[in-house]
Structure formats: C-alpha cells, structure tokens
Amino acid sequence: GENVEQHPSTLSVQEGDSAVIKCTYSDSASNYFPWYKQELGKRPQLIIDIRSNVGEKKDQRIAVTLNKTAKHFSLHITETQPEDSAVYFCAPGSGNTGKLIFGQGTTLQVKP
Amino acid sequence: EADIYQTPRYLVIGTGKKITLECSQTMGHDKMYWYQQDPGMELHLIHYSYGVNSTEKGDLSSESTVSRIRTEHFPLTLESARPSHTSQYLCATKPPGSHFNYGYTFGSGTRLTVV
C-alpha cells in the first residue's frame, strides 16, 4: 500500500518567518496532492491542493510544490502568523476511489 | 448550508456496549469515508463507500461495521466496545468526479471513550 512520510514532525518558527513541510509518498499512481490543517480540537480543513499535471500552486501566503519524479511535495507558508499554529497533514491520493492516505502530521508552532 | 454532521460529539461508554456513531451529509455526495484518529496523530482510513449499498474496508483493520442504505447517512457501529476503541472518529465526504476537483469535507468528529 501507499507509504506516506512527513518531515519534520514538529516545526517551531518565529512570527514572520517561513515554514516548509515535506511529504514523501511511494505510490506512483498518486495524482492528487492536498494539504490539510487541523487546529486543536477541530476538524481537518483543506488549505491547498495540486494535481499531478501542475508543478506549483500558490494561494496568498501558502504554496504547494510537486516533484512527481522524486515522489514528494511540499507545503510552503510565508510570513507566518500565530494563527498558522496547527497540525498539518499531507494526504496523497489516486484513482476514482478518492481514498486519501494521510501522513503522520507536522505540528507547526509560530511564536509571536 | 450544505455540510456534514456527526453525532454524538462526545461519548463515554462502558466496555461491551453496542454503539452507533452517526454521520449525515446534505451535500448529495456519493463517496463517504470514516477515519480513526488519536489526538494529534495521523488519520487512518477504516471504511469507505462509493454510494448506496456500497461499503469497503479501509487500510486500517477495524472491528467496526458500516452501512449505506441512504445517500445521506453512513453510520458506523461497534457491536461490543472495548477500551482499545477509544479514539476520535471522523466522517468525510468528497464531491463527485474522478479528477479531484475538491478535497474532502470532514465532520466535526466523535470523541469516543470506552471505560
């Protein structure tokens, strides 16, 4: 089955700095690459996603880059703010089933 | 507003009891999923459904069962709860189409504690 790994598992940055989280996957059939944000006690929320025919996508302060050859994609957050503090999950998926396999999560702490 | 709802939000129950976790959505989506998540940890797929009368087991073995008699409802049942079932259970739905135009929408989850 799909093997998904995220790095780092925890990340602490100063407000205003950038944060990068990397996700490595094993299934070459994966063609959809989302990132979810989960605040403490809340449901996961989709924050950005990319499909395999695109190398990069940006939405204001967040961006996702994909290297399909190397089977990894990354989440980039610029000008971090305290409200960015949360657990971030990558969840590559493939096929018509819509099944997403979640990484183990990265806890991001943004210090004011 | 179309959304996905889970009840109860919190449940504390004794060992051996039968419980059903409810999940309903007003989005009209065919594909629905159940994930199990320990606090702050990764989500594990335990069941999914492509539509009415379709149910499949996920990647994580689970002693729970599911049913899909109506598009809107995807309940999860534990016949005999055990302390090892203590966890958060998240239900999700996905819009139609094979090109992943949109991601999952998750419910608020049910935090289950078996004592």
Image (cartoon, coloured by chain):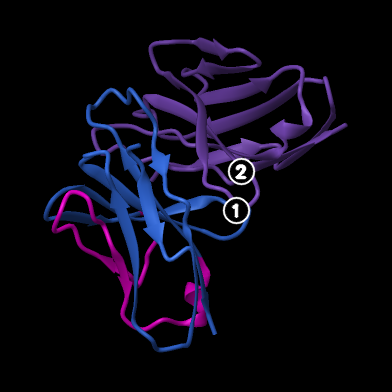
Specify the subunit that label 1 lies on.
B
Q: Secondary structure at mark 1?
A: loop
Q: Is residue B8 magenta?
A: no
Where is residue A106? Give x, y as percent: 66, 40
Image quadrant containing the N terminus of chain B: top left
B90 or B5, nearer to the observer: B5
- Which tint is chain B? blue
Where is residue B104? Give x, y as percent: 39, 37
Relative to A96, is B17 on the left or the right?
right
The range drawn in magenta is B59-87
Which label belongs to residue B61? none
The image shows residue B91, relative to residue A66, as above or below, that is below
Residue visible at 49% across and 51% down?
Answer: B43
| Few, some or many residues within 10 Å of mark 2 (<14, 14–19, 20+) | many
Q: Mark 2 highlights which residue? A: A105
Q: Is residue B82 magenta?
A: yes
